[in-house]
Structure formats: C-alpha cells, structure tokens
Amino acid sequence: MLIPFFYMLREGGMKTSITELLSLHEAMQSGLAGQSVDDFYFLARTTLVKDEMHFDRFDRIFGAYFRGVDDSLSDLMQEVPEEWLQRQAELSLSAEEREKIAAMGGFEELMKALRERLDEQDERHEGGSKWIGTAGTSPFGAYGYNPEGVRIGQHGSRNRSAVKVWDKREYRNLDDTVELGTRNIKVALRRLRKFAREGAADQLDLEDTIDKTARNAGLLDIRLVPERHNAIKVLLCLDIGGSMDDHVRICEELFSAARSEFKHLEYFYFHNFIYEGLWKDNRRRHAEKTPTLDMIHKYASDYKLILVGDATMSPYEIVYPGGSVEHWNEESGAVWIKRLLRTYSKAIWLNPEPRARWDYTPSVKIVREIMGGRMYPLTIAGLDEGIKALR
Amino acid sequence: MADNKFNGTSSYITTDDLSMAVNAAVTLQRPILIKGEPGTGKTQLAIEIAGSLGKPLYEWHIKSTTKAQQGLYEYDAVARLRDSQLGDDKVHDIANYIMRGKVWEAFDSEVQPVLLIDEIDKADIEFPNDLLRELDRMEFYVYETKQLISARHRPIIVITSNNEKELPDAFLRRCFFHYIKFPDVETMTRIVDVHFPNLKKDLLSEALNAFYKIRDVRGLKKKPSTSELLDWIKLLLAEDIPAEALRSDNIRNAIPPLYGALLKNEQDVHLFEQLVFLDRRTNPQ
C-alpha cells in the first residue's frame, strides 16, 4: 500500500531506494508504528530520508499524500468492514454523542456528512500553496471512515496535532539547493588533493623494513618515511571592487574554503583585469603592489592558477595597451594573461555570473578564448568541472 | 520488547521523533546515523542508550587519519619483527600480533552492545564505504589468521556526523537517519530542568529568553548551542547572578553577564557588542 507513496517521493525528486522501502515495511511489520500517524511519520522519515535537506520536501509530499488519514493506520493496509466500524464507533461514543448521531439521521448519514466534510477539506487544501496540489484526491481521503475518523465530531484535536508535525514544515530553511556553503566548496576543492610524502620521516615503512631486514640477514632494520599530506599548490587571483561587489559573499566563501583546504595557497587581488601589478591587501592596493612578473618568478609552474572574476568590462580593457580604467598600462591585459598562462599550464577562470549570461558580454567571450575555454561558473557543479580541468 | 524501549533517561531528554528513530534502529538492528548542530547531544545519545538499556558501550572516535581497518584489527608487524630478533616463542603464532579494534571488541561482546562511531565525517571520504559489509552483515575476515569474525549479537550502532563531508549513498541506505534539530523553548526548559533541578523559575525563563535572543541575532558565525547554555547557567549559578540582571528590557541595552560562555568567536562578540551599542543609541531609556 505504500508503493504509490514511494513513487510520489521519487517523483518529488527524492532518491528513496527499494532497500529503504523494504526496511520501512519491515519496521511496520514489527509493530513500530502501530499507534498513530505521528509515529508512522517519524518512522517513515527515519527510514526513507537520509539528509536533513530533504526533510521539508518529504514533509510536503507526506502532507499531500496522507491528508485525510488520521490516527488509525489500519486503513493504510486494508479497508475496514463497515459493520465492524459501526460497532467500534458505537463503543467509543458517549451516550450524548450517540444521541447526536441519531439526531443527524443515524450512522450512515453521519458517515456521509463526514465524507463531505473531508472532501471539502481536500478542496480547501487544493487551493493552497502546496506544490503537489493536483487532484487533492489522495487515495486515503476516501477512506475517511475509520474508527478515529468518526470522532471528528470532537474536532479531532489529536488529529490536528498529528498533522501539524509535518504541516509546520520546520525544516523549510534547510532545503536550499542553490546556495553554496563553504562546506560544499571544501568538498569540491578536496578533489584537488594530491598526496605526497614530504618533510620529516616519522612513519614506519613496513615493506621497506621487511625488505631491508631480510637483506640484513634477519637483523631488524627499521625504515621510516615522511607522512603523506596534501602537496597541491594554488595561486588564487580574485577580481575585487566594481561589478564584483554583487559577488562578495560567494568569493568570501570560496576564499575561506580554499584557505582551510590548501596548505600552499597564495592569493592576490586585481581590479577588472590582470596587468603588471597585483596586490595582497585591498586597503593598501596603491601603496603595496606586487609586480606580476615577481609573482611569476616567485611561484613556480607547479602552482595551479585559479582566477576569479566576472570578466565583465569593456573589451578595450583587455586587448589594448592603456585600456585599464585605473592607470596607464604599457602592455595590454591580454599580453599579461598569456604570460601567466605560459607559466601556469594548469589554470582556470571561475565566473560568478551565471553561464547563461556569458554570451551577452563580449569581454567574457574574449577571456574565454584566451583561457582556451577553461571558464567555469562559480557554483558547485562549475567548481567540480573546473577542478577536473586543473588536475 | 516493551521493556526494551528507549524513551530518554533522567539526564537526557528526547523528542518523540528521536526515540522513534532509536527504537526502529534497535528493533531492526540497523545502524542509526545522527546529525545535528554541534552541542545538541549526538555523542551523549549513544552513552544514554547504553545506560538506559543496560548494555555495554564501545566508543570509536574517528580522526582525520583513522582508517576503517583500524576499527576491525591491526597487525603489529614491528612487534613481531622485534620478537623474532629476541627469539621470543610468541613469534610463531601470528594471532599474538593481531590487535583488536573497537568493532571487533563490540562483535565479540557477550551481550548485545552499543557501538558508537563518533564523528564519521572527520575521516577520509572513502571511510564509510570501507565499512559497508561490516555494518551490513556484521562480519569481517582476518586475512592474517584466516578467520571470519562475525558478531555474536548484532550491536546497536550509533554513528554521529557533523556534516563536514557528504556520506556516500550506499552507506546511507543501510542506516536509519535522525537529525537532532535545535530544541524549542519547551524542550529546552525540560533539558535545563534535568541538569539543574533546583534552578529558580524566573532565572531559568530569563536565561532562556536571553539565550534565544542571542541565537536570533543575524550573522553570528557560531550560534550558541545547548551545551553552551548549560555551561552559561552553571556560571550564572556559580556567580549568583540574580534573574533581574537578565531581564529582557535590560538586555536591549546591556550585554548579558558572562556572555563569554555563549559566544565563542571574537567576531561574534564584536558584532554583538556593536548591535547592543546601536540599539542603545536608537532607543535611549
């Protein structure tokens, strides 16, 4: 009976697997969710959802699918015979309530009214902002006749409190697929790891020890090797100011992630495009400039170059001498960047502007050509691609 | 089964969804993965489960250098080499040099144990994948001695993660999952009650008030969590700070006492002080 729900989850973009569906069934068979919908909701969530980012999505689908079902779960498994229900209902009703039912025209009338009320409720919800709002006819909405459902006359406070758990949508702000956090960036950057043995020898090299000991006629000869660690070297050049102001946050995130991920990270700032000088401290950019040539000479070609900028400017700033908006540059930006690329064969350009907009800006086109197409958007996916190109 | 249900303990407050997740994992004998903000009691949970169900606890704390193999067993080749030099008789039996890991110890337990794998996200990205079979079948093979070690009783495995790395899908499929969300005021009151039963009512409500206000400040790098709140209250009690000092209208233009216990980041403290200062200028009293 949970199979339609399972498919609905998958349609809703959740990667729920068969194994997980089976373990939910197994859990229900061992009577874990016997008591209430609340329990069933918790159980389903703990078995089917493995990431808190998907909690909100799960809540919405659960809400859409199980609307109209309340405390009794038996109706998930089978339709309950009506006479049994009637007996149950009569047992659970007080004398007053029984009188009320009689006044309404007996049990059957009550059931009809109840069903109408449930239908009404469905329609109301349909009009809401639920995204799976199509034909609010959840298969269980029709199953309104269940022992607990009959108690709707008491305004089913239990019922409502049960629904609330997922209708509250407490996990709404966790379902953020767009935003980049430093954590995701770190995971992406981590792919660039390259381990090498460097520094003091302090770890036992078992194979070499055995080998040397054997050659030493069985006299123990312990061999040590240095510990492995990340030996990748990164040169990060960030465009700052002007049109980059919109992207400060994401650049900060990239920067802080890169800083904690790479031991050998050197960074420089530039404005709009790279010319003969770069700087390390943006506040003292005019006083303390590092000549670009010094940078090329200081950091050898085993550094990987990551340029970050929106590459949005007038084409003159790239291709003509004196094109810079800030100073007179003897040589054009294109000459300088080609010089950089000659030294650093592994280089990429990360662009915080979305890829769809690149074609509308001539300067982006020029930069992409110079970079040999190695321009990637500053998103997790783009970063992944870029890292691949760097390896 | 009824006596085997976990519903929190006298020193640990659970919510309904948490006890459901734990009970499902216990009943179906699957590992349970616990995530949540730091300081919400993820590690404590395993300790409390073991305590309340009366089971022995094995703790395996993961570091960035931990390998999956270390949890199973390690072969101490150096000791064996050394013994061979000294002509020790032990050297003939390789089993003497197999060091048991935490997982093996748990598998070998006489009664069903609780195994805590703490902060699994600290290890290398491949770490969880290396444990798939062990967690699924609860057995592993010792190549040196050619034995198959399988669990006498499938342990209750509690795995905690701080979300520093994404865990592989194949691993997640085998676990139950629970995200400990930050407790609401009601649950928090119960938590503080459990830890400080003799706390004066007004001090508690003022403290909670101030605490949630600080958590609501936008742009904090590290929001204070439950464990920080408990430390703070401990300090408040030790210093005998009256409830009036925490009064909410006071907080608007004064920094709560001993806030160092709540804000652990220099920038956060600075930001907070600036906000209070701004507030004082705009709303002079």
Image (cartoon, coloured by chain):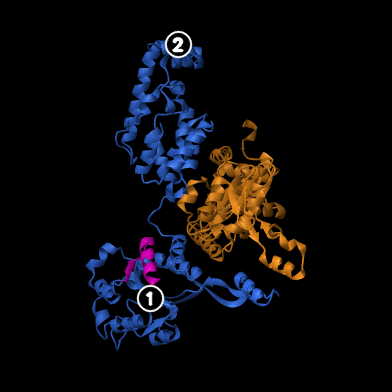
Chain colours: A blue, B orange
Quarter of image, res A113: top left
Quarter of image, res A188: bottom left
Which residue is the site of mark 2?
Answer: A99
| Quadrant, the C terminus of chain A | bottom left
Coordinates of residue B23 in the picture (x, y in percent): 57, 38
Coordinates of residue A345 in the picture (x, y in percent): 36, 78
Q: Is residue A136 left or right of residue A95?
A: left
Same chain for mark 1 and mark 2? The answer is: yes
Q: Residue at x 49, y 68 (%)?
A: A261
Coordinates of residue B205 in the picture (x, y in percent): 61, 45
Q: Residue at x 25, y 74 (%)?
A: A363
**Outermost residue toward the front in this view:** A217
First in sequence, mark 1 or 2: give its number. Answer: 2
Camera-nearest residue between A378 and B54: B54
Q: Which residues are magenta?
A: A374-391
Label 1 vs label 2, nearer the camera: 1
Which residue is the site of mark 1?
Answer: A346
Q: Is residue A250 left or right of residue A261?
A: left
Badge 2: few (under 14), some or many (20 or more) residues near its Cα, within 10 Å?
few
* In the image, residue B146 above or below residue A166: below
Q: Amino acid at mark 1?
A: Lys
Q: Residue at x 55, y 43 (%)?
A: B30
